[in-house]
Amino acid sequence: MNNTEYYDRLGIEKNASQDEIKKAYRKLAKKYHPDLNHEAGAEEKYKEVQEAFETLGDEQKRAQYDQFGPAGANGGFGGQGGFGGYQQQGGFGDFSDLGDIFSQMFGGGFDPNRPRKGQDLQYRMRLSFEEAVFGKEETIKFNRGDGAHEIKVTVPAGVETGQQMRLAEQGEEGANGGPRGDLFVVFQVSPSKDGFERDGADIYLEQKIDFVDATLGAEIQVKSVHGVVNLKIPAGTQTGTRFRLRGKGAPRLRGTGNGDQYVIVKLDVPTKLNRDQKKALEAFQESMDGTKKKSFFDKL
């Protein structure tokens, strides 16, 4: 089968790498996120992008999708993959009765009275950027077929959008004495209000610095999810220079310790200068090359 719809949604080729998939997803998710884009159709577009990434971002589901289409990615032809209870979001249809379906189609000993597992359910939980980094406890309410039911959910530190947590036997009641289905809590993380961006356990932040501080060197304060930290700027720092703050990232979900925070500095060039400031810069320029050149400062 030529299954390219999910690739088309992300605007990538079918042989795209995982890095290319993540990059395309971040760009489109930021463009269409309902909190940022209030145009008609943006939310639906966001859901389509989310659905595509949740399959293509997981190698096992991607392989099943490439071979069988959406049914394969949703578990119809390969089961559900996971990691210790956490896995990428996909379809949660209960395919435990697949053998029964084939039995009815091709003959065989189908027993309608055998115990069958109940339907799996899905609950979407929205988290702030900081809640996803540090985790939280929240009591959720949902309907599992026999009325409302409340349960306390412990969100692990370090989750990301699209990851999910399986709560065994919290789904709908089974048939003929069979076990309940499972509840899958799917996480959706809102963009940071402080300019942070995540890539796994690492966090990135653009930081404007005064061009004088960049030239002479300075110690500045920068934000991190763990609080304000001091950062030494060496003399002669260029715009785009990246500094690493060890251990100031998010917790590693399947490992130990935290990731790092990377601070990318951008020079903050003034757009307005008074006369004394302009003369001082012209004097500096003359000391560098011995001539008084007409520069962009003369045009201000």
Image (cartoon, rainbow, N blue to C red):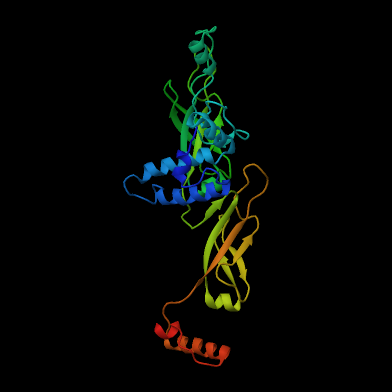
Q: Residue furthest right?
A: 256
The answer to whether residue 17 is visible is yes
Q: In this view of the protein, which residue sits in the foreground, 217 or 58?
A: 58
Image position, residue 189 (x, y; %): 49, 45
The image quarter in which residue 248 lies: bottom right
Q: How many marks?
A: 0
Residue in the image at 46% along x and 33% along y: 123
Q: Is residue 227 above or below residue 220?
A: above
Q: Is residue 144 above or below residue 17?
A: above
Q: In this view of the protein, which residue sits in the foreground, 2 or 61?
A: 2
Residue in the image at 42% along x and 40% along y: 48
Specify whether 206 is left or right of 234: left
Q: In this view of the protein, which residue sits in the foreground, 11 or 224?
A: 11
The image quarter in which residue 43 lies: top left
In the rendered view of the protein, which quadrant contains the C terminus? bottom left
Q: Is residue 259 above or below residue 63?
A: below
The image quarter in which residue 274 lies: bottom left
The answer to whether residue 162 is visible is no
Q: In this view of the protein, which residue sits in the foreground, 186 or 67?
A: 67
Q: Residue furthest left?
A: 40
Image position, residue 47 (x, y; %): 42, 41
Image position, residue 118 (x, y; %): 50, 19
Image position, residue 215 (x, y; %): 58, 78
